Image (cartoon, rainbow, N blue to C red):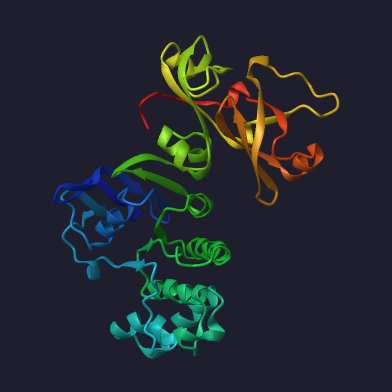
């Protein structure tokens, strides 16, 4: 029988503040899930309740079919990795990693074997005789990671473990964490406010906002099919148009610009005639004109004029901030397209908004 973690109607209140509201979630054994959301959304509080550091105000936590609400953290056998490394500076790397096993009176030979296995897994076996101050930040966090794994925890909880590291180190280390999770087959629950981090390493993403779960899904679904306006805005970048949708034609309230939305757009047919918010990703907007034998747009009403206000080089992608009827639109194009068109700030351009690439949400709801 799989050892799943189940949260049932979990709520946590701190005096007048409700940090987590009526949360229900199933985490399968061997799954890697990420809690993603802005500061104060309840993700760390949820992790602390799972770890046993906070007691739920109401609701139930099950692990392997048993209620664990009142079980102290030491008895849950869940490992935890924090943002701070919390390594003992007077102990060597191997002593830090083996400390938990030593406290459990495990024979020295078994401790050494386990320490060597784990340090080899993260490429630090040749550093085992060094002390934490002699290591880089990334190396120290890898030591903290394998130290938490040394005692064979059933679940590993990670609370923004990479947020204090440089960007390039974070990218490399999150790949290490994913590799370790796959090789060991351990359940991991990871808290982060970094959307790129969550999308790149998790099997499922739990997007939280104001103590609620907004959406739970695979990373690609979270990005391509956000369930709410909040998710569309928080995960990735989106352009929003708010107005009235009538017969699949949206009139933007701010600019009076009109766009055709195909029925393939999320829920557009069901909301027709009402106030809606439509979003479109920057990479879905097409820079039009300047190509030989370019086909005419499917919907001419979705071809709009604009002026480039800002150009931001992001490597293979160039981000344009375009003014369109006093509204700022973000457009992402390839570096080669940017060079081909020889674009500069102040240039007038045409943008095409594919009608099938809009997502539609009810107005007034996040």
For residue 94, what is the image quadrant? bottom left
Instruction: Name the residue at 30% across, 50% down.
Output: 42
Image location (x, y in percent) of residue 306: 65, 28
Image location (x, y in percent) of residue 246: 48, 10
Q: Is residue 279 left or right of residue 106?
A: right
Q: Is residue 54 left or right of residue 203?
A: left
Outermost residue on the front side: it is 346
Q: Is residue 214 above or below residue 365?
A: below
Image location (x, y in percent) of residue 342: 79, 40
Instruction: Name the residue at 21% across, 59% down.
Output: 54
Instruction: Look at the image and tell me whether residue 132 can be seen.
Output: yes
In front of the other: 363 or 345: 345
In front of the other: 64 or 364: 364
Instruction: Name the residue at 54% across, 17% down.
Output: 263
Instruction: Name the residue at 28% across, 43% down.
Output: 24
**Quadrant where the C terminus is found in the figure:** top left
For residue 227, what is the image quadrant? top left
Q: Is residue 151 left or right of residue 135?
A: left
Q: Is residue 340 above or below residue 295?
A: below
Q: How many marks?
A: 0
In front of the other: 310 or 48: 310
Image location (x, y in percent) of residue 283: 63, 37
In front of the other: 300 or 83: 300
For residue 274, what is the image quadrant? top left
Outermost residue on the right side: it is 292
Q: Is residue 162 above or below residue 104?
A: above
Instruction: Look at the image and tell me whether residue 112 can be seen.
Output: no
């Amino acid at each position: 029988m799989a050892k799943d973690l189940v949260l049932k109607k979990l709520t946590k209140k701190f005096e007048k503040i409700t940090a987590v509201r009526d949360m229900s979630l199933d985490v399968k054994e061997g799954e890697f899930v990420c809690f993603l959301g802005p500061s104060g959304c309840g993700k760390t509080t949820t992790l602390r309740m799972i770890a046993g550091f906070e007691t739920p105000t109401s609701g139930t936590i099950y692990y392997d079919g048993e209620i664990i609400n009142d079980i102290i953290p030491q008895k849950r056998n869940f490992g935890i990795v924090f943002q701070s490394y919390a390594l003992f500076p007077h102990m060597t790397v191997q002593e830090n990693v083996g400390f938990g096993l030593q406290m459990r009176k495990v024979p020295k030979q078994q401790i050494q074997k386990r320490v060597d296995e784990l340090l080899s897994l993260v490429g630090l076996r040749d550093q085992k005789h060094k002390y934490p101050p002699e290591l880089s930040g990334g190396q120290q966090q890898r030591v903290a990671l394998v130290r938490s794994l040394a005692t064979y925890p059933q679940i590993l909880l990670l609370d923004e473990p990479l947020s204090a590291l440089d960007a390039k180190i974070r990218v490399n280390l999150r790949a290490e964490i994913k590799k370790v999770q796959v090789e060991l087959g351990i359940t991991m629950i990871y808290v982060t406010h970094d959307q790129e981090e969550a999308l790149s390493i998790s099997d499922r993403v739990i997007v939280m906002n104001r103590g609620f779960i907004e959406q739970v899904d695979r990373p690609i679904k979270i990005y391509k099919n956000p369930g709410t306006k909040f998710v569309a805005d928080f995960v990735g970048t989106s352009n929003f148009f708010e107005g009235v949708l009538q017969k699949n034609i949206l009139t933007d309230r701010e600019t009076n610009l009109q766009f055709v939305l195909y029925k393939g757009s999320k829920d557009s047919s069901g909301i027709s005639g009402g106030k809606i918010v439509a979003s479109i990703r920057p990479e879905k907007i097409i820079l039009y004109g300047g190509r030989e034998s370019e086909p005419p747009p499917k919907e001419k009403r979705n071809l709009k004029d604009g002026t480039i206000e800002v150009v931001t080089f992001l490597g293979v992608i160039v981000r344009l901030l375009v003014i369109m009827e006093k509204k700022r639109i973000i457009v992402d194009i390839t570096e080669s397209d940017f060079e081909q068109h020889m674009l500069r700030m102040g240039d007038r351009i045409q943008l095409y908004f594919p009608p099938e690439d809009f997502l539609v949400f009810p107005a007034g709801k996040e």
